[in-house]
Amino acid sequence: MAKFLDPTSANGGTGGFYSTNLIRALASPYPGWGQIQMYTSNGESHYEALQSQFNKRVGKNFFFGSNFTYSKTLAFSRDQFTADKLLENIASGTRPFAANINVGYALPNGSKLWKNKFSEVVADGWHVESVMTFYFGTPMSISCSANGAPIGYWTGTPTGGLPFRCEQTGPLWLPSGTTPGQAGSTAPANLWYRFDAASFSLPPVNSLGIGNEQPTVTYGPGVENVDLTVYKQFRILEGKLLEFRFEAYNALNHFNPSNPNTSLSLNYSNGANTNSSFGTITSAALPARHGVMSVRFTF
């Protein structure tokens, strides 16, 4: 902590040092306070949605339920140097469309066709249930980093922090029919997004690092998933139930890709992208089909 010499010490006074906090208190109603922050970091989020659902039960054996959501969440963290609207973005987890469907069916007892103890044990008490989900993709943006930049090159580092965004100078997509090989990528065609790396560059020197690229330029792959459950119940005694259950997750073994790599590593001197994985999908959003068998005893 910086200190200032007490001027009375030169005139035979008590001498000593004054704390800078005490000096600051002369112009403040809060004696002894330290550094006073003149800005704050906070943010806002705004969610709007259209939600609907439809449920139907048919007799004692069949039920159907569904819901649909059309939504958007806008969010931003305030910055002392930048206008709020420039920071506003669609929140990372937003899926504009989401639909869920669930069905359940209690199969008619097979013992009705052949009534005996064996058929009751084997053919009665079967149930089939399924949950289906269909989600739109999540928002994506293209990020830029400088490779080989000189010392002192700014990347959104002034006090308070600034977003560092690419400068977009052309279309997002390469022409239809462009293959990964033509774009210098080794990714399979079904695991590659036709992003045009040449359409992005480092932001201009006088931009404070905020290029003209929109925070959300497109959306990633959606999700389609079906979970299936088959189970059978045995009534052992009054109030006691034994259940054998088989559950298959991603029962159709549908491949749901994650978002592709959207990070550009641009050479500072010539602007060339050095990230060979740009535009490539490298993982799955959901695991492949797998099953679980379980036994449950209720009493």
Image (spheres, grey):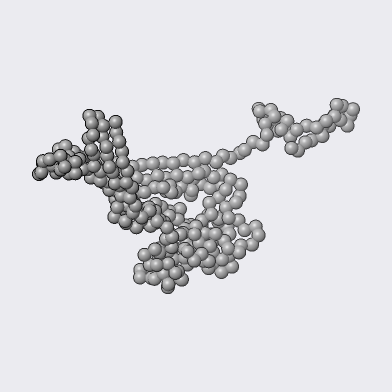
Task: Tell me the residue at 85%/26% (across/down).
Answer: 14
| Residue 123 visible in the current orientation | yes
Task: Tell me the residue at 16%/42% (across/down).
Answer: 118
Up-down relation of residue 18 to residue 274 (above or below): above
Snapshot quadrant of residue 234: top left
Q: Is residue 82 left or right of residue 189?
A: right
> Residue 24, how many percent across, how many down?
71, 33
Snapshot quadrant of residue 149: bottom right
Task: Tell me the residue at 46%/47% (across/down).
Answer: 88
> Residue 163, how many percent across, how many down?
53, 51
Q: Quadrant of the C terminus?
A: top left
Up-down relation of residue 129 to residue 182 (above or below): above
Q: Quadrant of the N terminus?
A: top right
Front residue of 291/173: it is 291
| Residue 105 visible in the current orientation | no
Task: Tell me the residue at 17%/44% (across/down).
Answer: 123
Front residue of 129/293: it is 293
> Residue 85, how many percent across, how many down?
47, 47
Q: Is residue 156 left or right of residue 114?
A: right
Q: Is residue 235 left or right of residue 75?
A: left
Snapshot quadrant of residue 192: bottom left
> Residue 201, how many percent across, how many down?
51, 63
Front residue of 16/245: it is 245
Up-down relation of residue 72 to residue 209 (above or below): above
